[in-house]
Amino acid sequence: MTHENITAKVLALDLATTTGWADIAHGIIDSGSRSFARKPATKTRPASTPGEPFCLFDAWLNELIRTAKPDLIVYEEVYRWMSSSAAHAFCGFRAVLLKTCHYKGITVKGYSPTEIKKFFTGKGNAKKRHMIAEARKRWPELNLTSDDEVDAIAILHLHLKNTTNQRATNL
């Protein structure tokens, strides 16, 4: 996917145990997802500690920032969760994100799930399958199977649309 007129470097994140990401640099969008799930114990190693996913996320985020060099990070700002474990995970990842951006001087902006879904599918209460179906319709050449990656791409496109509209209004 390309957006030739975009010069800012923007990184979009869908914060969760599996975090989706999408970035744009020089008009080219790249995306993916990364799991930070705790690992159960095996015969040869103990289970992950409760803090390990956040340490792994912190290291991954710092590396992503080092390579992508974003001017801005946009993310899905969630206020309601399906479970307490989802709430704990999101809030932990969000805290790491905000701390990291504070120290690195990177601006952060959150978008609500309803705003993202309405922009991307036309329905503010769209389900994960609707988001994936819309992404496949828009970009059939891409192998987008992770709802986390799709959400990050949708967040990025919402921000790009808002930025383009704001620039047009200011002209």
Image (cartoon, grey):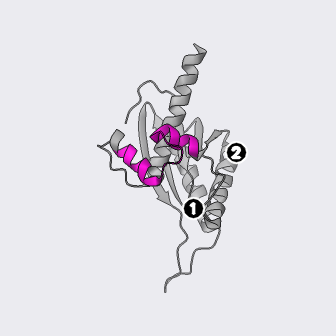
Q: Mark 1 points at which residue?
A: 56
The part of the image, by quadrant, that contains residue 104 is top right
Q: Nearer the viewer, residue 45 or 144?
A: 144
83 to 170, vertically: above or below: below
Q: Which residue is drawn at 46% across and 53% down?
A: 128
Is residue 151 something one can see in this rendering? yes
Residue 103 is marked as 2
Mark 1 neighbour density, 10 Å: few (under 14) some (14–19) many (20 or more): some
Q: Which of 47 and 167 is in front in this view?
A: 167
Read off the magenta span.
114-136
Q: Quadrant of the C terminus?
A: top right
The part of the image, by quadrant, that contains residue 4 is top left
Is residue 22 something one can see in this rendering? no
Left or right, 101 with reference to 165: right
Q: Where is residue 156 in the image (x, y as percent from the top left)?
A: 50, 39
| Magenta run includes residue 107 | no
Q: In which quarter of the image is the N terminus?
A: top left
Most common secondary structure along the magenta stretch: helix
Q: How far apart are marks 2 and 1 (CA)?
A: 18 Å
Q: Where is residue 144 in the image (x, y as percent from the top left)?
A: 37, 50
Left or right, 122 with reference to 50: left
